[in-house]
Image: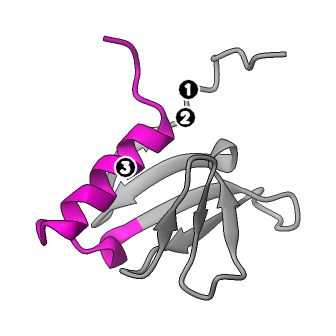
């Protein structure tokens, strides 16, 4: 089986939150952001976050994180997924 993409990992985490095995507030998304000095920004999810096919919508409904900008997914400080920097993007 190939490497999981961020959508599949997030889908499983959202499913686990519905079955009360995990709270979405434990999940952090590290996202590329050119407007900050370090080049990345961290967002913490909440239980009212919405997963769409191409983005995550945070509780405020104004913050939308495109999935292609996610570089890491963490839960409780543990790294669950990291973007493969060597992967080629489709033209």
Picture coordinates of residue 32, whole percent (x, y): 72, 53
Please name whichever residue, 15 or 34, is drawn nearer the observer in this view of the structure.
15
Disc ID at residue 30: none
The reply, left or right, for residue 28 in relation to residue 12 is right
Kindly identify which residue carries mark 3: 11
Kindly identify which residue carries mark 2: 83
Which tag is nearer the camera, tag 1 or tag 3?
A: 3
Total numbered labels: 3
* Secondary structure category for the residue under label 3: helix
Bin the neighbour count of mark 3 within 10 Å (Cα to Cα): few under 14, some 14-19, many 20 and up. some
Q: How is the image coloured?
A: one colour
Instruction: Please tell me which residue is depicted at 49% across the width and 41% down the height of the picture.
Output: 6
Q: Quadrant of residue 17?
A: bottom left
Disc ID at residue 84: 1
* The magenta stretch spans residue 18: yes
Instruction: Please tell me which residue is depicted at 25% across the width and 57% down the height of the picture.
Output: 15
Which tag is nearer the camera, tag 2 or tag 3?
A: 3
Mark 2 to mark 1 CA distance (whole Å): 4 Å
Mark 1 to mark 3 CA distance (whole Å): 19 Å
In this picture, which residue range is highlighted in magenta? 1-27
Instruction: Please tell me which residue is depicted at 44% across the width and 52% down the height of the picture.
Output: 73
The reply, left or right, for residue 77 in relation to residue 33 is left
* Secondary structure category for the residue under label 1: loop
Q: Are marks 2 and 1 in contact (CB under 8 Å)?
A: yes
Query: Is residue 60 placed above or below 90 in the rendered structure?
Result: below
Q: Earlier in the sequence, mark 2 or mark 3?
A: 3
Quarter of the image for the N terminus: give it.
top left
* Secondary structure category for the residue under label 2: loop
């Amino acid at each position: 089986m190939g490497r999981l993409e961020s959508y599949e990992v997030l889908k499983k985490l959202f499913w686990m939150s519905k079955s009360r095995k995990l709270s979405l507030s434990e999940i952090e998304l590290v996202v590329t952001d050119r407007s900050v000095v370090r080049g990345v920004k961290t967002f913490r999810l909440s239980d009212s976050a919405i997963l769409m096919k191409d983005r995550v919508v945070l509780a405020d409904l104004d913050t939308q994180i495109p999935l292609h900008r996610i570089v890491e997914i963490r839960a409780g400080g543990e790294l669950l997924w990291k973007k493969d920097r060597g992967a080629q993007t489709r033209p």
